[in-house]
Amino acid sequence: MFIDVGLDEDTWTQLRSVSVDPGSLATESDLDVVRKYLPNLGTEEEGAVAATMLKVGAEEPGSDDTELRLRPFDAQPLPEARGGFIANVDELVTSIDWAPARDATHTDYIAAGGLGPGSAGSVSMGVLLSKRVREPMPGAVHIWRLDTGAECACRLDMVLMHDFGRCLALRWCPVSTTQAGCIGILAAIFGDGHLRVCAVPEPNAIRRHSGPVYAHWPQRGLADIHAPYGVFTALDWACGDVLVAGTSRGSVIAWHMDAVLAGDTAPIVHHQLHGEDIRSISVYCVGSAPENDLNNERNASGFRRVDLADLQVLTLGIDGRFRQLLLQSPTRLNTAIEYPSRRTPVGAAYWPYGSCIYSEVDKALRLLREPVLSAPRDPWIRSTVGIEHAYADAEAPGRQQWN
């Protein structure tokens, strides 16, 4: 996803200038209240909560595995040969995303959302996607801090507590914020059927004690949108000022943030693509491949403009079908890019540079190597990927598989 790319420079400027009033977020110091959202939270005085034992496979054949003991909400570095960190989020994670990097800083933030405390692992994802949470249910979005300077470190820095139920998906807005004390703008969909957008403060701006900051989700965020039918099941930013979401009824809905920030949540696109749940959404910006950079150069302010015609959406349904949607012309007849021979709960899809990467039920990660937009078919909707309406084996031409 390109940073600081959008349809309208004025909206981009407004999004970059969003600030967070420290007094608008209620922080929580009462650990009994916090444990409603983080039931396994422990303190040194009370003794350690039972740690999770993990085995990290050796890098070299014949070497011994490394054992790590991780308390809930703790992070530890992986063995030096592997590098990186491993963290215990203490819940089933459904979505994770990096905040846009900021210049001249060695600090990155990662947001993670999941099914919440006490989530039952036996409940199928299909049920979770289609069933709306009717009563308040505790949940939390975790903000992890990763320092990449001279001394690398990873820790849980803030928890945004809420009563919206499970967090099904979250994405940071791809806009570099200019306001001190603000990490960025986060969009998330929850089990109560709402899509919410809020500005997330830097933890240090509202920190009143050492350790992670426990704050409640803002009462008045940038947007609170209710799905017209069913519930929201997937989302992505088409660019810095266009937000796209899918629903349990198979619809794709898009909003321009210029109107949303003004309180108007009427969508610019609302189109039926699938008959059932949309599992994953990924957006491809035409001409964004490295060898064919975006048509418009960045201006002096750092903004790069794209047209609505440049934005194509890939959706992946619970029926296993991939479909394309051109945001400028969503009502044209869409044909599925690929038809599986069976209903398969495909997990997620990503569309970098016109090729599609997706995961499937057999724990394989597959790549459609041929660019989706390479062959001229319909001038608006092109759906050739080297195979014509047939589910090929992983070894077939144009496909690659990793286990």
Image (tube, grey):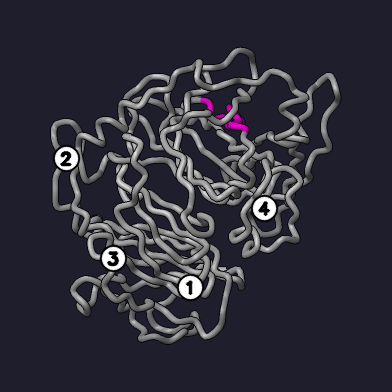
> Which mark sits nearer the N-terminus, 3 or 1?
1
Q: Which quadrant of the figure has residue 375?
A: bottom left
Do the numbered discs 3 and 1 sit on residues whose CB atoms are within 8 Å?
no
Q: Nearer the viewer, residue 104 or 342?
A: 342
Q: CA distance from mark 4 to mark 1?
A: 45 Å
Q: Which residue is mark 4?
A: 58
> Which mark sits nearer the N-terminus, 1 or 2?
1
Residue at horizontal 61 percent and vertical 23 percent from the top? 213
Residue 19 in view in this figure: yes
Q: CA distance from mark 1 to mark 2?
A: 40 Å
Graded by Cα atoms within 10 Å as few (under 14), some (14 to 19) or many (20 or more), the crowding at tag 3 reads many
Residue 275: image tag = 1
Q: Nearer the viewer, residue 326 or 287?
A: 326
Q: CA distance from mark 3 to mark 1?
A: 16 Å
Do the numbered discs 3 and 2 sit on residues whose CB atoms are within 8 Å?
no
Where disc 3 sits, the SS reads loop
Q: Which residue is mark 3?
A: 330
Q: CA distance from mark 4 to mark 2?
A: 45 Å
> Which mark sits nearer the N-terminus, 4 or 2?
4
| Amino acid type at image mark 4 | Ala
Where disc 2 sits, the SS reads loop
Q: CA distance from mark 4 to mark 3?
A: 49 Å
Please name the predominant secondary structure of the magenta segment in the image: strand
For the C terminus, which image quadrant? Answer: bottom right
Magenta segment: does it hold 165?
no
Magenta segment: does it hold 153?
yes
Viewer-nearest of discs 1 and 2: 1
Residue 402 in view in this figure: no
Where disc 1 sits, the SS reads loop
Q: Which residue is mark 2?
A: 298
| Amino acid type at image mark 3 | Pro
Q: Which residues are magenta?
A: 151-161
